[in-house]
Image (spheres, rainbow, N blue to C red):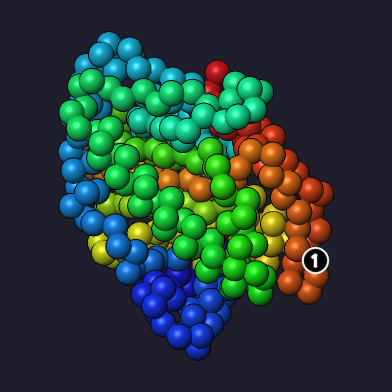
Amino acid sequence: MTIPTIDLRPWLTGGSADRAAVARTVDRALRTAGFLLVTGHGVDPALRTRIRAAARAFFTLPAPVKERYAAKVGGRGWLGPGAEANAYSEGTETPPDLKESLTFATDRPFDDPAVNAEWYEPNVWPAEAAGLKALCADYLARMEELTNRLLTLLGEALGEEPDFFTRHMSHPTYGFNINWYPGTDVVGTPRPGQFRIGPHTDFGTVTVLDRQSGKGGLQVFTDAGGWADAPYDPDALTVNIGDLMARWTGDRWRSGRHRVLPPPADAPAEELMSLVYFGECTPGTLVESVPAPVGRVAYEPVDSHTYLRAKLDSITVA
């Protein structure tokens, strides 16, 4: 599986030749699996550790306490067991995903009341998760900065102007999930075809994932190799592109198909937690495929958030 590790420092501080070399490597990687590992990102590992500790204090509370913060898919708050089945987005019927999530989004309301009604509501910070709000504010500021740097890199990798993508990100909705994958003592024995997260592609532009290694962890699909465990580096963040970015590039780049395995039979108590930042556009962005020869498929233009809403609805378990 060709998922390279990219050190961002030559891109951020190097000369034109260094930057061009990084851009070429990124382009090659995104044509195959749609995934990268990135180092030199500047996100403090201690911050990620503190977020996990604060979130775990919440996730391990009794269900009636967590239910005070219950939200719908795409909302703000707690998504309990059985809320999502991500494989639904591919048209595959699977049992619900074996996870719980705390989900947040932009804390800046929009000027348009219609956009506000659809895409903004205040974040819900559980009182029982001491310090989580401040920790996430720090983390999300770093994610916004990192995502803009990545999108500038992607603009050059595509052969476009550096702001080709970032000019559409002035007020993104974004999404941030803290996903908790407990063991079978919490979720029970997995049913046939049941995953911590079922096979799917992400829906937006760029996803930045801080994950933990485990037997029931992330797998990535490629045409050449099928499903395989994603490479892991504790110092790296995992980056993949989503459906809107794939459409934007006319399928030059692959929307990274992936899944998270269920708790393994030989380690049923395994517990993992992921911090997942979903990069999105400013509402109202029209996503149009770049023409050939860069793009391979000319998709019909789509409104970014009409597309996102349909996808979020598709994974909601009734």
Q: SS at mark 1? A: loop
Q: Amino acid at mark 1?
A: Pro
Most foreground residue, 285 or 229:
285
Q: Is residue 94 above or below residue 2?
A: above
Residue 93, image x and y in percent? 58, 32
Q: Residues within 10 Å of mark 1 (few under 14, many from 20)?
A: some
**What residue is drawn where x is 50% and y is 88%?**
17
Most foreground residue, 138 or 47:
138
Left or right of residue 24: residue 145: left
Please identify the residue farthest to the bottom as the structure is shown: 17
Q: Is residue 92 visible?
A: no
Most foreground residue, 197 or 48:
48
Q: Is residue 22 visible?
A: yes
Query: Residue beneath label 1, please?
Result: 291
Q: Is residue 261 above or below residue 298?
A: above
Residue 232, image x and y in percent? 32, 63
Residue 221, image x and y in percent? 52, 58
Residue 178 picture quarter: top left
